[in-house]
Image (spheres, rainbow, N blue to C red):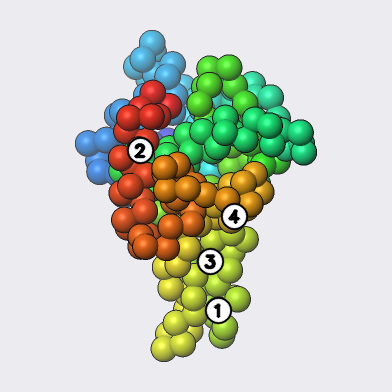
Amino acid sequence: MLDDRVSNEVYIDKILELTNYQLKLGWPDDYKRHLIETLWPSLFRTSNLSMTDRHSLWSLVNQDEYLTFKVMGSCGHFYAVEYLVPFRMKSYYTNLKAKILVHLMGTLKLFYEFLNEPLHWCDVKFDNFGLSAEYPKRFLIMDGDMVFTESRMRHFLQSTKCTRDTDCHFFDCEAKCDYATNHCTDRVNDNIDVFCKKLVTQLFGNFWTKSNRYLAACHDESMNATERLADLRLVWSWSLSDV
């Protein structure tokens, strides 16, 4: 906890510093006013932070999910997120697999559109999805403990010591061991790989056609990872622009 005697300006500087440490986004000083007003909307009304506000906000910013989820309100170090209906994959849902595929792609799209860098999700499974009437073309993540900014993912992996590749497998996020440094490399698979392997294949098996660009992204080996993402971005731009 910060010294209670520091000025509001110093406190806000420290909030920016802590947020950058948590997310590894490197936001500049001129972003701090926008950041603090986003994290603590009541500042619009009061233009100042009480000591209670300071203690509460400091506790909240130390919780990763508070920074990455849509927060509806808070009280002390507790916070509430929007209400979601848990999604539980059932065998008979395969009759709705085309609609589920759209939801998956709407969700995947947003991982590549988070602020100024992508997000990485390392615990991909249907049980971690929720549904909201407010978002008819995508799922929402129920548990964000395994969601990381790209900078934070890179920092975590490159700080991890290893003697073999499996030491660099962090749930669904995989890297390789650099034997010259005995530290992990950057991630070698991506969100698309994992969505395809763990979710799309569960619905469609190995069936795919080039006319369905979503399924082709999982199976068309003529494209490398960069081309695949570029192709998906193009499809997203006209089919899921309102996600």
The outermost residue toward the right is 91
Q: Nearer the viewer, residue 129 or 77?
A: 129
Around disc 1, counting alpha carbons within 10 Å, would you say few (fewer than 14), some (14 to 19), or many (20 or more)? some
Of the image marks 1 and 2, the number of the one nearer the N terminus: 1
Cα distance in 3D space between marks 4 and 3: 23 Å
Q: Residue at x 60, y 76 (%)?
A: 166
The quadrant in which residue 33 appears is: top left
In this view, 201 is above or below 10: below
Task: Please tell me which residue is depicted at 42% across the width and 19% down the height of the picture.
Answer: 41
Q: Of the residues shown, which amino acid type is indicated by label 1? A: Asp
Numbered disc 3: secondary structure? strand
Secondary structure, mark 1, is helix
Q: Mark 1 = which residue?
A: 165
**Label 3: how many Cα within 10 Å (few below 14, some 14–19, many 20+):** many
Q: Nearer the viewer, mark 4 or mark 2?
A: 4
x, y percentage for residue 203? 64, 44
Q: Secondary structure at mark 2?
A: helix
Residue 112 at x, y = what percent? 39, 44
Would you say the residues marked 4 and 2 are in contact, meaning their CB atoms lie under 8 Å apart? no
Q: Nearer the viewer, mark 4 or mark 3?
A: 4
The residue wearing badge 4 is: 206
Quarter of the image where the C terminus is located: top left
Which residue in the protein does label 2 denote?
Answer: 235
> What numbered label is drawn on residue 174?
3
Is 225 rendered above or below residue 147?
Answer: below
